[in-house]
Amino acid sequence: MRRPMVAGNWKMHGTRASVAELTQGLGEMPIPSGIEVAVFPPALFISQVIDGLEGKGIIVGAQNSAVQPEQGALTGEVAPSQLAEVGCKLVLVGHSERRQIIGESDEVLNRKFAAAQKSGLTPVLCVGETLEEREAGKTLEVVGRQLSSVIDAFGIAAFANAVIAYEPVWAIGTGLTASPQQAQDVHAAIRKQLAVKDAEVANKVQLLYGGSVKAANAAELFGMPDIDGGLIGGASLNADEFGAICRAAGN
Ligand code: PGA
């Protein structure tokens, strides 16, 4: 059985004060048994959140990490080994905002994926198509290519210690959500692509859906057979709303 995961991507939001308030709210939130809850604060606040959530059973991850595992001369970056040392467990790799706005290529993302694993972090590989690609009928081709990039570089075994998040770009921050069936179709295709190489890895890997998930639509999405939880942006900035999404995953 795959454990559901609900992960909050705070993106570039927060001040010391708002992060303290959100952390306190999360700490007071009852977590349903049997699910994993994670948050990804901005790098600046990771230590603050780890300290604030001590003993609360919430995993803390980073939104980005460097292309090399170890610390060194790489101005402005944070090494995955440094993140691991302060207590991070997960790192997002390939979020569409980094692919599109920062311009990260598959090659750079592969290096980040490998460096994260080498440092003991679990990468959360984000994949997803733009509206243009969906309308052109290219959704599965695009997602398949993003996934193949990692499989071709490191083999299917790389997904024995990774999470995958399917996030259609057109649904991120727009209030448009993929219908449960649209999301399920892509999740099933992702699992099938992995299963061709290794059925056990495919069966075990957690596949999260992301894109305008909120308390009102979470249960329906999480009820689909290949959706193992969600990567939540905007709705993760409110502890009550995020808590309700966690409860939806626990039911
Ligand atoms: P959203 O963002 O929930 O605000 O749409 C999801 C994400 O980008 O991870």
Image (tube, helix red, strand yellow):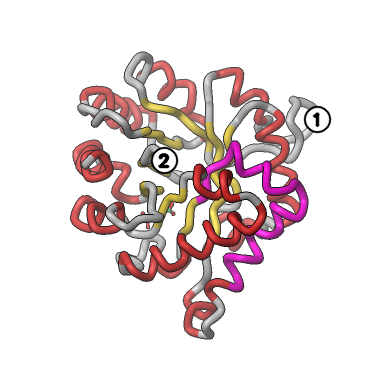
User: Residue 175: x, y in percent?
Assistant: 30, 65
Indicate if the residue with disc 2 has its beta carbon within 8 Å of ligand 1: no
User: Mark 2 sits on what residue?
Assistant: 2
- Tell me which segment is drawn in magenta: 141-164
Q: Which mark is residue 10?
A: none
> At x 32% / y 25%, what residue is drawn?
20
Q: Which mark is residue 73?
A: 1
Counting the numbered discs, the total is: 2
Mark 1, other Cα within 10 Å: few <14 / some 14–19 / many ≥20:
few
> At x 33% / y 59%, what residue is drawn?
212
User: Residue 130: x, y in percent?
Assistant: 51, 72
Q: Is residue 62 left or right of residue 173?
A: right
- Quarter of the render that holds ligand 1: bottom left
47 up-or-down from 76: above or below: above
User: Residue 126: x, y in percent?
Assistant: 54, 53
Q: Nearer the viewer, residue 10 or 209?
A: 209
Query: Which image quadrant for residue 112?
Result: top right
**One can see residue 176 in this view:** no
What kind of residue is marked 1? Ala
